[in-house]
Image (cartoon, rainbow, N blue to C red):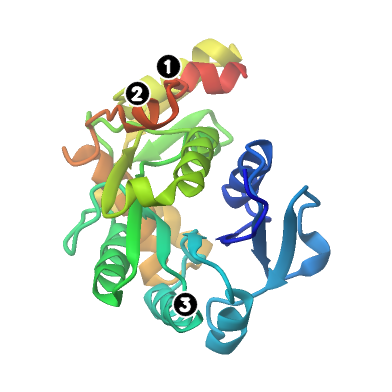
Amino acid sequence: MASTQHIAVTGSTGALGSLVVQNLADLGVAQRLLVRDLSRAPQLPEATASTFDYANRDLSKDALAGIEVLFMVSAPESDHRMDLHSTFIDAAVAAGVKHIVYTSFTAAAPDAEFTLAREHYATEEYLRASGLRFTFLRDSFYLDFLPALVGEDGVIRGPAGTGHFAPVARADVARTAAKILASASEHASATYEMTGPQSLSMSDVARILSEVRGQNITFYDESIKEAYASRAEYGAPSWQLDAWVSTYTAISSTTMAKVSDHIEIITGTAPMSFEDYLRK
């Protein structure tokens, strides 16, 4: 495979991006790692690192010079994330980037139940209007995140009801993203649903955790009023509280229940189940 660097990856030191760049390295793909701190950049063959900032158009434009394909991990959650996304996409356009592969969210829509999915939809629309080629990876909630939902008392609390969702491992998203980046032109204008192989309720999550860990973990279906009250003590801003609570109400709805086979189609290997992930 040619060693000319034409692929760049944001979030190269983060939970998802670090897995993506390692997968690209394993494929022998040259890449540019976009980081905020050069001292933290992974040391990988055929890779160089450049500093960038979602909020700094000029810095990002310089970091993207000569790049054709960009893997854009969504910016950190904030009350101005869409502004960061639009600034960074504008920088990519100015730098001559041809194609952006963006980590969106399942059921992204202007009126999505999960409040942060609305920002992902707005970013998708901004990319559509940018003139760039695009590929959207609509990730479900990450399997990696689920154990952290268990309280010190062994209870998962939230207004999820009996709703189902299809959580996915970051590792499966990362290896899929690497395959797409290595042959990006084959995936132009595509939207892929990144899910695991199971549609689970939060009661299922508690049961599987109990079985694998040998602990008694249960799920308590809070009312929405209870959910806001139990999280108010953290002193988070209202947009963050809305995101935390709507994590569960989105599961309660029917919008996240469908299992997709896109990961297996793209990579040839099925994504791991929750039990697989916990035992790995």
Residue at mark 1 to residue at mark 2: CA–CA distance: 6 Å
Q: Are marks 1 and 2 in contact (CB under 8 Å)?
A: yes
Report the residue that reaches farthest toward the front: 2
Dot 3 crowding, Cα within 10 Å, few <14, some 14–19, many 20+: some
Residue at mark 3 to residue at mark 2: CA–CA distance: 48 Å
Q: Residue at x 24, y 74 (%)?
A: 129
Quadrant location of the C terminus?
Answer: top right
Instruction: List x then y, in percent, for residue 142.
Output: 46, 39
Nearer to us of marks 3 and 2 is 3
Residue at mark 1 to residue at mark 3: CA–CA distance: 50 Å
- Which circle marks residue 203 in the picture? 2
Nearer to us of marks 1 and 3 is 3
- Which circle marks residue 207 in the picture? 1
Quadrant location of the N terminus?
Answer: top right
- Mark 3 or mark 2: which comes first in sequence? 3
Residue 204, by quadrant, is top left
Instruction: List x then y, in percent, for residue 34.
Output: 64, 66
Question: Helix, strand or loop at disc 2?
Answer: helix
Q: Nearer the viewer, residue 177 or 76?
A: 177
Look at label 3 and name its amino acid.
Gly
Question: Helix, strand or loop at disc 1?
Answer: helix
Residue 80, by quadrant, is bottom left
Look at label 1 and name its amino acid.
Arg
Location of mark 3 (residue): 96
Q: Residue at x 65, y 48 (%)?
A: 18
Residue 278's place in the image compared with 53, above or below, is above
Residue 100's place in the image compared with 60, above or below, is above
